[in-house]
Amino acid sequence: MRREKIRGLAPLEQPRSTAELRVRQLRARDLLRGDLEGEELEKHVEESVLATRLEKVLNWGRANAMFPATFGLACCAIEMMSIVSPRYDIARFGAEAMRASPRQADFLILSGRVSIKMAPVVRRLYDQMLEPKWVISMGACSSSGGMFANYAVVQGADKFMPVDIHVPGCPPRPEALLYGFNKLQRMILGNPDPGWRSRYNAAGTEEWARDDSITEGGAEEYARAREVARAAGSPAGADAGAA
Amino acid sequence: MPDAPGLELIAQELNDAHPGSVLETYHDRGQACLIVDPEQVLAVLGWLRDTPGQEYRFLASLHAADYLPAEPRFGVHYELLNMARVERIRVRAALHDPAAPGRGSSMESPEATAEGKVLGAGAEEAASLPVIDSCVEMFPTAEFQEREVYDFFGIVFRGHPDLRRILMPEEYVGWPQRRDFPVGGEPVIFTHNEREVPRWYE
């Protein structure tokens, strides 16, 4: 398991396999010898030199200095408060300055159940945030209504506002929220997480319905999709064949 | 807590003072309850509060319950506390549901004040909501508690200064805690029912 460096100084894109790493090493050797030229030279420079694109620098700055607008609605707020504590320090990622005002905040941690009376208020605060803005929906209640499948709770905050990261848990442990926050940072940096299946070498293990009643010829279609997924590796495999 | 004979005594004195008010008494697990006629609930509460021997001057809770298949359908409960002796007594006003089939609108004569102040109910519905007197003058704490009962059961309190929804949003339609109100929420999609449950794009 390789840990992706969020500090992102260099290299900006991780090599995806040992073969790619070898290629990069050979290119570096050729560069030093003066043998690299043309398109290969440009590509190498682009891959290994910092600040090739202003956008990447901006993204790095955004990701590492995020101001959360904490919207502590219910019990998840307690775990959200605890990520500021020294044990689960969110200050090491630069996000300890929790801004009460939505105008000064970058992303919204929606922690807790959203009742239907509160939903327009949350939406208004979200609208008052300035671009770029993201939303982490923390906990089961804001992701899907949680244990409150009743007349008073909105079954998921993404029914009325866009959500980028859902963090499951009731409440999620502070480490889980920090992991969600790290995922958000990677999203901002431009290399979104391809998912646990790629990290644990579990590319073809998605479960599909196995009988024909979903579509005509459904079983073969799914078998074909599964082959494609296995061949292409997980990032494609997670999306392929979703009917 | 008045014990069972004490409760019977209270019921008897109450019936002497206000005939026909106490319909039943109920003593279970050390808790005393008087079941009264909703028309006379103010008289009962006043008697319990002011009579020198009784002095239940503290309204601990005002809530309602829906006993749906049983008649009368609603019970408005007043939990009273005597602070000197630390004795609690419960008064249940047994209300019928005027909207129930077969009952007609024999419930109350149309109360202009009650309907004028009721918000959140359509004009045709206001006639079919159960009505009871408000005890706000006697126990000021009842103001919010009666609003909550109105919000969740649709029981209108005659004479309440500001009867509107307190917990649900003001435009909400329905009385959530009634027994025939659906629980709400969405069906959770598992593998075994994912084909039957329609998604948001269907």
Image: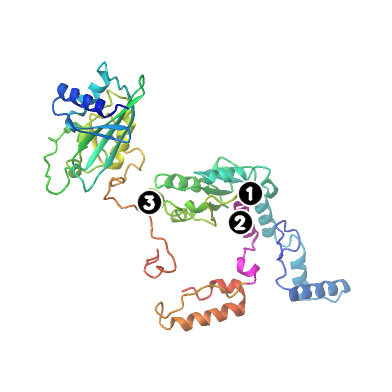
Mark 1 falls within which chain?
A
In front: mark 1 or mark 2? 2
Question: As shown in the figure, which amino acid type bears the numbered disc 1?
Answer: Met
- Give the percent coordinates (x, y) of residue A173: 59, 50
Disc 2 designates what residue? A184
Question: As shown in the figure, which amino acid type bears the numbered disc 3?
Answer: Asn
Residue B202 horizontal side relative to residue B48, left or right = right
- The residue at 24%/29% (across/down) is B134
Label of residue A3 in the image: none
Bin the neighbour count of mark 3 within 10 Å (Cα to Cα): few under 14, some 14-19, many 20 and up. Answer: some
- The residue at 70%/71% (across/down) is A16
Are labels 2 and 3 on one chain? yes
Mark 2 falls within which chain?
A
Q: Could you tell which of marks 2 and 3 lies nearer the N-terminus?
A: 3
Q: How is the image coloured?
A: rainbow
Q: Are marks 1 and 2 in contact (CB under 8 Å)?
A: yes
Disc 3 designates what residue? A150
Q: Is residue B159 visible?
A: yes
Residue extent of the magenta highlight: A174-201
Q: Secondary structure at mark 3?
A: loop
Instruction: Residue at the far front: name it.
Output: B5
- Give the percent coordinates (x, y) of residue B181: 28, 50
Q: Marks 3 and 1, how far apart in space?
A: 35 Å
Disc 1 designates what residue? A66
